[in-house]
Image (cartoon, grey):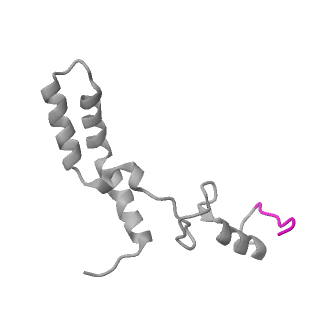
Amino acid sequence: MAKTSAVEKNKRRRKTVANQAAKRAALKAIIMNQDLPIEDRFKATLKLASLPRDGSKTRIRNRCEVTGRPRAFYRKLKMSRIALRELGNLGKVPGIVKSSW
């Protein structure tokens, strides 16, 4: 089996989350509905548990668009601090001005 990079895994997870979102939301609504009988809610819980793990939104990791680095990620710019600094020094990020690094 070929090794996949973490960036590719994350992209695959995003697709899975998008595909499974409606199904997961419907099952969670059944589980949380206190008016339904406990048997139906338990069946919904088992169905939710049988869905792929990567379908959960919490499995997605924010990664830098430039380097794929998972740490020190700026959500607004979608890049890590290291990539931001390098591209900022080159003047390739609009609105970023070097003050004193």
In the depicted structure, whether residue 90 falls above or below residue 75: below
Position of residue 67 in the picture relative to residue 28 (left or right): right
Q: Quarter of the image holding residue 34? A: top left
| Residue sitting at x 67%, y 66% | 81
Please state the horizontal and vertical placement of residue 48, each as a whole percent of the image.
Answer: 23, 43
Q: Nearer the viewer, residue 36 or 77?
A: 36
| Residue sitting at x 32%, y 45% | 21
Position of residue 14 in the picture relative to residue 43 (left or right): right
Span shown in magenta: 95-101
Q: Quadrant of the N terminus?
A: bottom left
Name the residue furthest top.
35
| Residue sitting at x 13%, y 28% | 39
Q: Nearer the viewer, residue 90 or 13?
A: 13
Please state the horizontal and vertical placement of residue 67, each as a whole percent of the image.
Answer: 56, 74
Q: Nearer the viewer, residue 79 or 38?
A: 38
Name the residue furthest right.
100
Name the residue furthest bottom.
2
Please state the horizontal and vertical placement of residue 76, each as a whole percent of the image.
Answer: 63, 54
| Residue sitting at x 29%, y 49% | 20
In the depicted structure, whether residue 3 falls above or below residue 9: below
Query: How many numbered discs, if any?
Result: 0
Position of residue 80 in the picture relative to residue 28 (left or right): right
Q: Quarter of the image holding residue 14? A: bottom left
User: Is 70 in the magenta?
Assistant: no
Q: Main secondary structure of the magenta part?
A: loop
Q: Quadrant of the C terminus?
A: bottom right
